[in-house]
Amino acid sequence: MTIAAAILAVLLALIFLALGTAKILALQPMRELATEAGFTVAAYRRIGLLEVAGAVGLLIGLFAPLIGALAGAGLLLLLAGALVVHLRKGDGPQKYAPALVCGLLVTAYLVLQLLTR
């Protein structure tokens, strides 16, 4: 694993640990986002669990690259789902930009993982 891939893995893990934990705890801003997106709080908590699992997988991937790649692929699927939800709702770029940027970062991580095999 390259240093760039390791840095991306840690950065993404921090992002998804924070976001996932906020969803699991159902903090007020996350409750509002869940309602706005048409999800129940329970469904949003499950999404948070998947985000935390993906973050843990990225960290494990520092030592077991296959696990990191699988976690990255899972997070990429979650982000694609988030982008679809935003686009179906007719949200503008300000709403879907975080999912898009995180998706690009995860894609960069996966490309680096593939190039170093």
Image: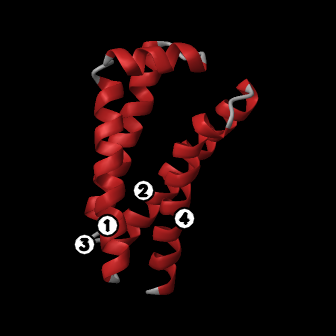
* Residue 80: x %, y % from top left: 62, 45
Mark earlier in primary sequence (2, 3)? 3
Q: CA distance from mark 2 to mark 3?
A: 13 Å
User: For mark 2, what is the residue?
Assistant: 71
Residue 117 visible in the displayed image: no
Q: Residues within 10 Å of mark 4 (few under 14, many from 20)?
A: some
Q: Nearer the viewer, mark 2 or mark 4?
A: 4
Which amino acid is tagged 3? Phe
- Residue at 55%, 17% (x, y): give it: 39
Give x and y (percent) for residue 54: 38, 49
Viewer-closest of 1 and 104? 104
Q: Which mark is residue 107?
A: 4
Residue 66 sits above or below residue 30 on the image: below
Residue placed most toward the observer, 105 or 65: 105
Rendered image: mark on residue 61: 1
Alpha carbon separation for disc pair 4 and 3: 19 Å
**Residue type highlighted by circle 4:** Thr
* Corner quadrant of residue 38: top right
Q: Are marks 1 and 3 in contact (CB under 8 Å)?
A: yes
In the image, residue 26 lies at what x, y percent? Answer: 33, 18
- Measured in 3D between alpha carbons, the distance from the residue under mark 1 to the one under mark 3, in whole angstroms, is 5 Å
